[in-house]
Amino acid sequence: MALAWPQGECFFKRSALQSGAVNTVARFTAEDPKLFYSTMVVEMVWNKEAHHGSEACKENSNPKGHPHKRSGYTIVTGGRGWKTSYGNWTHLPFSYGAYYQPSRQIQHELCTDGERFKKREHGDAYESWFMFVPLPTRHEEWVFIDRLCSIRAIYIPVSYMASEKSEDLCTYIHVRFNGMKDIALEYHKDKTPEKFAEIFDFETVEKTTATLTCHDTFGIEHDETTAIGINITKLVTTLILPRQFRKYDAFSSKAIILVDTSLIPVIPVLSRFTASAMADWATVASKNHGVSVKWAEGDHSPHWLLSFLKNTLVVCAGLVPGIGPLLSMGSALLMEALINPDGMLEEFKEQLPGLGEMFDEIFDLSKECRKGMAVKMDIASPTQAVTVDTNSDDAVLKTPVQADEPEQEEKKSTATYVNIPSYTALSKAEYDATVGRQLREALGRKLGGLAVEDRGISREQAKAFQELVTNPPKEHQDKTVDELFEVVESKYVRDRLKAMRTSLFTKKMEEDFRASETESIKKRLLTEATPDSSSRLADNFYEWAENASRKIAMRDNPMLAFGGGPR
């Protein structure tokens, strides 16, 4: 089987890239163009613990384990008398936003199953799995991935259909770390790691070069003190060229950098992805290549001597008069539980076939129940509703509900339900057509309600300008309110109209004033929405909170509605 170059184009069958149960919000399928173009893929090693043994796990230290500010840490054992300690973080954090201020975070579940770690230690293969996580939006340049697991590769979608002659193939740009040896990255080192980070502090960053050694199986291994920063746009534009024509690669172009994890601020967790949202590498490879690929399993069967002793004891117990059959059955179950716990259920079915069939029916029913519960998993829905009480003074954010669930009616409720599409952000044209238009209309209503004649302007002149603001002709549709003032021919009327605004400022002054007025409201919305950092919110909730805080500030401060600021 041929390999793709470690940096550049690679191809998958779209039908192979699928995860989650059918018809659930956990499902990713590359067959859906919207999901394909809004999702990046991270290949990681699933059944590998970060720390092995009590000493490495710091089981008896204070604090216990290896705490991390963006993920929990747990210490587990293999169970059934197996006392070896395995330590691993519970989630892999992804922080999105501009370099100087990441604004949202999602988390993906990591393996904390001691039984999986034990079986892998006893001979099972290391398993590679695919995580499907959102791409940064068009307003976000970077995604920072804390190094809390072994990352083998990252994949960025490029083309839904690679060629008309191969309609099922899709194109990704990938960086395969397990196909490299030593890589040199720009390293942003925190000179004050003890300081609590709210934004990237450029004065405390020291830029150097760091060399990472990649493992043939694990790729980039874990390191809780650093994170990988990826500039998606720069990475794609660098690697989309054939490798013979590239001047830079993913690392020399600084599309992928290394940063101290202490530099990344702690921000609200907007959604969590569970293990059911992943895809097994072996399953994807089987569908890609048309052959059956399975992970190697270790020999977990008991030693032949133990099996001989078990059979001897069972035969001897069966010879006891009267209670022999019952004693024989109990001995078989007891010995199987001691020497081969994994085969306990099969032994039980063999001894009591009728009860075994009942167990099978119960397990089938359990699968149906889990299938029905899949829609309740911690995966952000493509559309999610939030509730804002427009009657309260500060529009306190209520608990979000899934958009596909019927809202329960409440008596005398003034709540407004707003559907927010995930993984999208308003473009400039969309902003001008929505929020910008609302601002113009607000000014028009204000003009219509004022006693304009007292200001030396006739009602006809005010009405004409109000019509210009709320219904601008085609040649003036892209103009701001300030630019529309200049359309008025009479300088006297123009000056009087300007005076009706609280004051006029440059765009930068307006933006600064808006930020000062809305930042505290935005932080309060986010804090109230995620009091324990566990609420399930849409991935673009941060942008929604920003827009909502503007509306609240404009309601409470009329100067904002007119583009004004402090005098």
Image: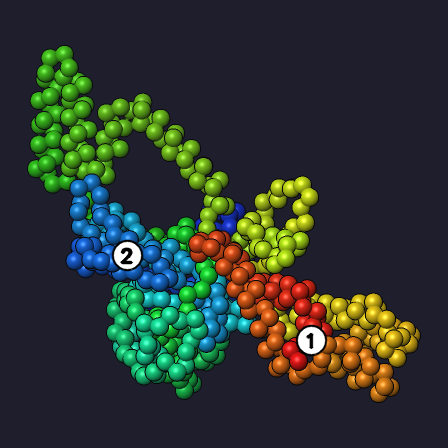
Residue placed at 49% from the left, 59% from the top?
Answer: 527
Depth order, front residue of 151/379: 379
The local crowd at label 2, few if under 14, some if 14 to 19, many if 20 or more residues have their Cα within 10 Å, is many
Q: Is residue 8 left or right of residue 293?
A: right
Q: Quadrant of the N terminus?
A: bottom left
Front-most of residues 473 and 69: 69
Q: Which badge, 1 or 2, comes first in the chain's sequence?
A: 2
Q: Which mark is residue 399?
A: none
Q: Residues within 10 Å of mark 1 (few under 14, many from 20)?
A: many
Q: Position of residue 362 (x, y in %)?
A: 38, 30
Q: Which residue is mark 2?
A: 88
- Circles 1 and 2, Cβ within 8 Å, touching? The answer is no
Closest to the camera, between mark 1 and mark 2, is 1
Observer able to see residue 281 = no
Reading the image, the residue beneath label 1 is 563
Q: Residue at x 19, y 34 (%)?
A: 337
Inter-mark Cα distance, 1 to 2: 51 Å
**Can you see residue 528?**
yes
- Which structural element holds mark 2? strand
Instruction: Determine the image quadrant of residue 257.
Output: bottom left
Q: Residue at x 25, y 49 (%)?
A: 76
Q: Amino acid at mark 1?
A: Gly
Name the foreground residue: 263 vs 159. 263
Image: 373 above or below 395: above
416 horizontally vs 448: left or right: left
Q: Position of residue 396 (x, y in %)?
A: 58, 55
Identified by mark 2, the residue type is Asn
Q: Position of residue 376 (x, y in %)?
A: 49, 45
Say how many tags the image has.
Answer: 2
Check disc 1 and report its element: helix, strand or loop: loop
Task: Residue 480 in the image: state x and y as whole percent.
Answer: 72, 78
